[in-house]
Image (cartoon, helix red, strand yellow):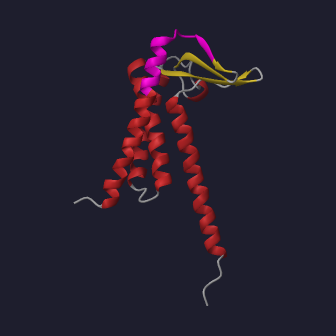
Amino acid sequence: MPEPVQAHWSRWLLLSAAVAAADLATKAWVSAAFRTGDVHVVAPFLNLVLWHNTGAAFSFLAGAGGWQRWFFVGVTVVVSAVLLAMLRRSGGNRLLASALALVLGGAAGNLWDRLTLGHVVDFIQLHAAGYHWPAFNVADSAITVGVALILWDGVRDTLAEHRQERKPPDA
């Protein structure tokens, strides 16, 4: 009979699946509604665009000639396996489990694009004062929030350990 923790960790995969589904659904909508390069102003700081990114974050290695697709697929598969192992060991730490699930779901959404399209569909573009942030998608957002939560979890644990060390011993 599986341990309660093992049953619990697998429920976080539903969050990963929801992130991947939302990512793929929004990419499909934008891909059907826009042409590559279209810019639709939503707010003074937000555009919807259609951009095909053959690289990684900030189009890193986008012009590398094609080998980067399989490199990023391999990296994503390895990172996803590590995330699954970490998720399984996250125990009752809900913050860490949700963070890992967000990163895993985002990785799955972008992996699907790379495998099926050969590029990642990006469509959210933030801008201010003439400066434009590179376009991104729901998967990228989930990965960013997940990484921030992982960092916060580590800071929180460090602060708790520091407080414990400073606590006077009971006499």
What residue occupies the far front of the structure in this picture?
43
**Residue at 54 percent of width and 10 percent of height:** 36
The vertical placement of 11 against 62, above or below, is: below
How far from the left and from the top, in percent, is residue 21? 40, 30
Image quarter in which the N terminus is found: bottom left
Q: Nearer the viewer, residue 83 or 145?
A: 145
Left or right: residue 155 versus residue 99 is right
What is the count of numbered marks? 0
What residue occupies the far bottom of the structure in this picture?
171
How far from the left and from the top, in percent, is residue 86? 43, 51
Left or right: residue 155 versus residue 83 is right
The vertical placement of 15 against 29, above or below, is: below
Image quarter in which the C terminus is found: bottom right
| Quadrant in which residue 59 is drawn | top right
Please state the extent of the stretch shown in magenta in the rendering: 24-41
How far from the left and from the top, in percent, is residue 162? 64, 68
What residue occupies the far right of the structure in this picture?
129
**Residue at 44 percent of width and 30 percent of height:** 22
Let me know if residue 57 is in the magenta part.
no
| Quadrant in which residue 90 is drawn | bottom left
Left or right: residue 89 versus residue 1 is right
Q: Can see residue 33?
A: yes
**Residue at 44 percent of width and 35 percent of height:** 19
Left or right: residue 146 versus residue 108 is right
Let me know if residue 37 is in the magenta part.
yes
The vertical placement of 19 against 2, above or below, is: above
**Residue at 56 percent of width and 41 percent of height:** 145
Q: Nearer the viewer, residue 146 or 84?
A: 146
Q: Can see residue 76?
A: no
What residue occupies the far left of the structure in this picture?
1
